Amino acid sequence: MRKFIIILLFCSSVFANKTYEIKVDGMHCPLCTAMVRGAVLKVKGIIKARATLDDKMLRVEAEDSVEKQSILDAIATTGYKGEFIE
């Protein structure tokens, strides 16, 4: 039983994902949110991305190996600037 628990804990830490909230000022229409979301989803290791217009936020689920700067760089390709909410 102990071995099973140790293996389970190891696997859960290896496959852990991170969730980020990023403020993206300037988005003003559904096309803006679609462009930002699409750009971020092209980053290797991004699992989910959801941009919302009402609060101008991007919520991202990413593998642990994804660098924050790569997400910001992807947002910048759309002409917007992202800021991580800590």
Image: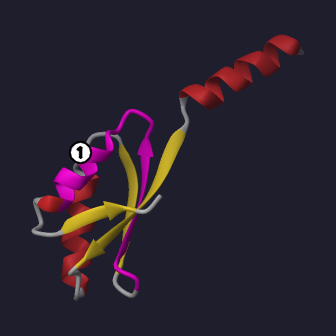
**Across the whole image, how many numbered discs are drawn on residues?**
1
x%, y% of residue 39? Answer: 20, 59
Is 26 displayed left or right of 6 in the figure? left
Is 21 above or below relative to 61? below
Q: Residue at x 81, y 11 (%)?
A: 3
Name the residue rendered at 20%, 78% in the picture.
Answer: 32
Locate residue 44: give its quadrant: top left
Magenta segment includes 10:
no
Residue 73 x/y as whole percent: 17, 52
Q: Secondary structure at mark 1?
A: helix
Disc 1 crowd, CA 10 A, few/some/many (<14, 14-19, 20+)? few
Horizontal placement of 9 versus 50: left or right? right
Is residue 66 within the magenta segment? yes
Q: Quadrant of residue 13?
A: top right
Please state, as top left, top right, bottom left or bottom right, where the N terminus lies in the image: top right
At which x and y percent is residue 66?
35, 39
**Measured along the vertical axis of the image, is residue 15 above or below residue 25?**
above
Write the residue at 49% across / 46% down.
18
Query: Among all residues in the image, which is located at the extreme front?
Result: 86
> Quick check: 14 above or below 83?
above
- Which image quarter: residue 69? top left
**On screen, residue 16 above or below 36:** above
Percent across and percent down for residue 11 are 63, 25
Task: Name the residue furthest right.
Answer: 1
Q: Amino acid at mark 1?
A: Ser
The span shown in magenta is: 55-75
Q: Which residue is mark 1?
A: 70
